[in-house]
Image: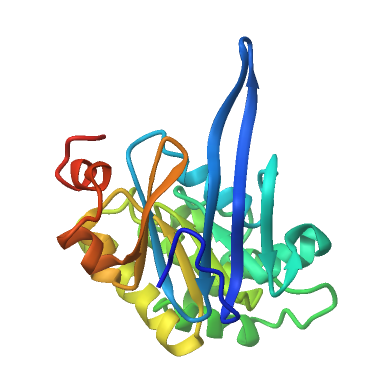
Amino acid sequence: MLGELNISNSAILKLINLSKSVSVNSGSCVIIDSVSCEFNKNEIYSIVGPSGAGKTTLLRLLNRLDEKTGGEIIYHDSPLESYPVTELRRRIAKTFQIPYLFPGTVMDNLAYGLPEGQDSHSKSLARFLDMVGLNSKLIYADPEKLSVGQKQRVALARSLVMEPEILLLDEPTSALDPGAARTIEELLLRLNRELGLTLIIVTHNFDQALRLGGNSLILADGRLIESGETETIFKNPGNEISKKFINGELR
């Protein structure tokens, strides 16, 4: 279970007083404010909170798409900065709210995730389509002709080609209809269960966080307000800010 500074030996990713600020005309604006927590292997974490809470920024800091301005991020007992960026983003992969696929074919997109020099034969890549519940015949398809739900699954497959340990997902179902969103949720649960992936997911949807289970972090104004088992937090929030957010009083 997460805690304000519950750093244990079982954590694969640890945040210690993590901060991020940006320059503005009048000085600086704090986006992430001294966040400390940990993420354990093979678990699911939902990051929730009002608009502008810093959820997406926090996610981007975890594989250096944004750079921190204070504190530490420790991955397998080493500072995040000690890993070459390319290697880091293979280990801690990210998918985006709107799936972006490169021009070419689905196979071209999957091959993009391969280490240099590794076999890009269609049969070896098609198995990643199977992992995300897509017909392997789509390997030669034009990504532009796929539905949004199919594109999201191809984007997930492209991340899986890199064989990550942690998968970061920013609102992965916000552009999907409810049925397609449920399909992605079930897929994420299966990937967590069968591949042992640690999933860290930004979502605005309480019901989605509950369906995914695991743990949740509630952010507000860049601060970690509460963290712990998702069901426990949502049914019995531990402080007034969490309660107001869960009751819809903060947006």
Residue 213 placement (x, y as % from top left): 29, 72
Left or right of 1: which side holds 178?
A: left
Q: In terms of image quadrants, where is residue 125?
A: bottom right
- What residue is shown at x 79% (from left), y 81% (from top)? 118
How is the protein colored in the picture? rainbow
Q: From the image, which quarter does the N terminus lie in?
A: bottom left
Residue 11 placement (x, y as % from top left): 57, 75
Q: Let me know if residue 198 appears in the view.
A: yes
Q: Is residue 7 above or below residue 63?
A: below
Left or right of 246: which side holds 83?
A: right
Q: Is residue 232 above or below residue 61?
A: below
Residue 102 placement (x, y as % from top left): 62, 53
- What residue is shown at x 80% (from left), y 64% (from top)? 83
- What residue is shown at x 61% (from left), y 42% (from top)? 19
The one nearer the camera, 242 or 205, is 242
Residue 117 placement (x, y as % from top left): 85, 77
The one nearer the camera, 108 or 168, is 168
The one nearer the camera, 178 or 154, is 178
- What residue is shown at x 34% (from left), y 45% (from top)? 49
